Amino acid sequence: MSQVQQLYQLQQVDTEIREKKQRLGEVLRAQKKTQELLAARKRLETAVADLQTWQSKRQDLDLELQSLKNKAKSAERRLYSGNVKNPKELTDLQHAIESMGRQRAALEDELLEAMIMIEDAETEQTAADESLQTITAAWEKEQTNLKQEQNQLALRLHTLTGQRGQIAARIPDRLLAEYDSLSKKMRGVAVAKLQQGICQGCRLNVSEHTAKSVQEGRMTYCNSCGRILAG
Ligand SMILES: [Zn+2]
């Protein structure tokens, strides 16, 4: 195998290593929690918190109403007991009972509102829970696929690295150094195929002289981009 062919082989392995590494990076990034999943979790958390707020509000109102009812009952008992003789005290007692009646009506309105809010919050919690389950199932399936791809990529990269070592061992150091420095300058592509007189690195025509030199298997450089040309 000519040196140019060896360099081209090295180039092919390096190109695949670069592509696989790039994909591996994408696969690893995609395995982080997705925005959609985070939003669905947040929605459920909010729904649960809302429901708890309204349930506790309802409990408070229930207690308040119960205590008001007891107070009103005992005031009424006192009013009708016949023990209160003082007219001023009787009037005050009557006013207090009326006032408690108004408070009771207001509390009952608030209680009704809390019960409506609880129903809404329960509906929202069920919807949020179902949505999270659907999104989680899809996410888990995707994660399984990504994990599988990650393993395949890692395995392939391991093989390629081994191949690269074997190919590079057969190439003289001086040439390898030239390849590496050219590769850095040419964004990872030091060796380009020459196809129908066109350099596949820069897509420009090369001279007839250059094309002939490539055909003869000699180390030849593209007139335009300076890459090593492989036939
Ligand atoms: Zn070129």
Image (cartoon, rainbow, N blue to C red):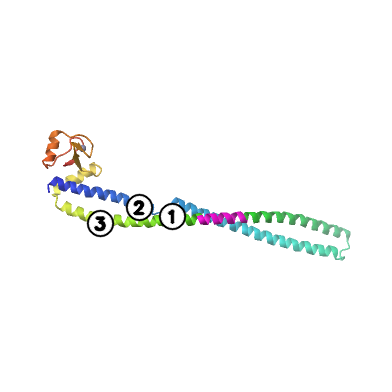
Q: Nearer the viewer, residue 91 or 197?
A: 197
Residue corresponding to mark 1: 138
Q: The magenta stretch spans which residues?
A: 118-130
Q: Nearer the viewer, residue 173 or 62?
A: 62
Q: CA distance from mark 3 to mark 2?
A: 17 Å
Quarter of the view holding residue 219: top left
Numbered tag placed on residue 27 in the rendering: 2
Q: Point out the tag, 1 or 2, that comes first from the N-terminus.
A: 2
Q: CA distance from mark 1 to mark 2?
A: 16 Å
Residue corresponding to mark 3: 158
Q: Nearer the viewer, mark 1 or mark 2?
A: 1
Residue 128 magenta: yes
Name the side, left or right, on which 66 lies relative to 49: right
Amino acid carrying label 1: it is: Ala
Name the side, left or right, on which 211 lies relative to 14: left
Q: Point out the residue furthest to the front here.
A: 196
